[in-house]
Image (cartoon, grey):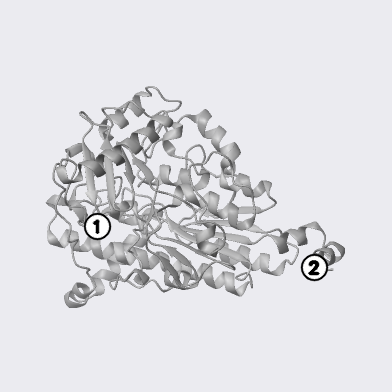
Amino acid sequence: MNKKLFLVLFALIIGGGSSIMAQTKPNVLFIMTDQQSYNMMSCMGNKWLSTPNMDKISNKGYRFDKTYCVNPVCMPSRFSLLTGHYASEVGVKENTQAYDKARVQAIVAEDALGVIFRKAGYETLYSGKTHLYGTKDVSEYGFKINNTDPYDGPAIYAEQILSDIGKDKNSKPFLLFLSFLNPHDICYKAGMDKRFPAGLPEANTRETARLLTFQKTLSPEAYRKQIPPKASNSAPINDEHPDMVSMDIFPRSWNNDQLDLYNWMYHRLTESVDFQIGRVLAALKNAGLEENTILVFTSDHGDMNGSHGLILKNVLFEECQRVPLIFSGEGIKSNFVDKSTLVCNGLDFIPTICDLVGIAVPKGLPGISLRPLLTGTGKNPERKYIVTEDYNGYQITDGRYKYTIYELPGNPEILTDLQTNPGETINYAHDPACKEAKAILKKELMANLSKRGLTPLAQDRTIENLRKQENEGKGTKGKGKSSEE
């Protein structure tokens, strides 16, 4: 009798079926921050902040440095992470309640992360921020919600539940999804939001208020030493159409003090959430669950932080599209940095995590499993392009060139070259030298959109028009106000 069979039979005799499940399936711990750009970790060489806990995850795991979110704003990105589908499949591409309710329900019933893992015998647990289409308590997505405070709530819950699980030798394997809010508080413009602090809930102001109080205790010299340099690509890209980057806030009229405070606050808020992540890592270790747990760390999108003269998100540039993505656990390469593989966290997470734990991957998802890369076993996935989207455009990238077409009058285009112009300050869409590269990408993108029923392209997807349509309830299954969070 081989050793593995003996262990299974032994578990049957003394532990029952749940004990077998705990031994044969690894746990999954998913940690997500909100609005954290890929380079906002000290392990990425950013010397203007300290993120020892994110760095610890990276040192123990496999880090993908070319990871793009599906859509650089909260609701559509989170929908993709938890279903593997594009938000455009439910008729929206922004933070809104005007989605196709029936389509959301159909997708969630079959492909939601919690539903998949619950059917496979996992305990599916969730804590923190939700902000999803079709739900407020994530039960539709197959999870039980615990502690909805998105600041330290996920850490508090993790400390409690991991300790309990560590003591229960017959517990089922778990999928624990921890959704932290920060550094999203940067949306409140480092305290300069006209609603701050009186017009916002206390929960949305307390960390910003704490850091503003701390900032006032610093001498001018000490504060200056903590301010990172301004973005080197602060100029708008040529041929910029105003509605390409239409957002509620434009910092192009800000003075240096305002820009410096925003930059400083973004880094401090990232350090704040790193501290909370440290509590989770300590809880996992103290519970004795590290060895049998796959840990995944990512963010839903990034922040422009002054690049192109912009802040916040919702534009198809690197700063708010690229996010951290790290996997760690038994059998996964450790302290490994992949600087070349094109990855989309929202599309690739479900195929990858299902593959890693031995659950059948739902059919028809557009993403790929990264398991062969993570483990060094099996055939590496083949991928030439990633297709992403935002509220008014679609983009395709091959890792070097990024081609974007906008749902605006005349369908304006942007072509950037990350090899020769990594700051994306030059639009090569009308450069004869890039004609062939543009033609190839445009053909591939339009074929993808046509296959998904997204052509012909719309002509009026500005933020203002979308909000007007939503409020009027035109062509939607539901009504509601667009949400910043």
Q: Amino acid at mark 1?
A: Gln
Q: Is disc 2 surrounded by few (<14), some (14 to 19) or many (20+) residues within 10 Å?
A: few
Q: Earlier in the sequence, mark 2 or mark 1?
A: 2
Q: Which residue is mark 1?
A: 419
Q: Give the residue displayed 19% in from the left and 47% down from the top.
A: 250
Q: Position of residue 249 (x, y in %)?
A: 22, 46
Residue 358: name its quadrant: bottom right
Q: Amino acid at mark 2?
A: Leu
Q: Give the residue displayed 36% in from the left and 64% down from the top.
A: 270
Q: Which residue is mark 2?
A: 7
Nearer the observer, 27 or 273: 27
> What is the C-alpha distance between the residues marked 2 and 1?
53 Å
257 up-or-down from 204: above or below: below
Q: Residue furthest right?
A: 13
Residue 330: name its quadrant: bottom right
Q: Could you say whether the residue bearing mark 1 is in a helix, strand or loop?
A: loop
Q: Position of residue 166 (x, y in %)?
A: 67, 68
Counting labels gives 2
116 up-or-down from 294: above or below: above
Disc number for residue 166: none
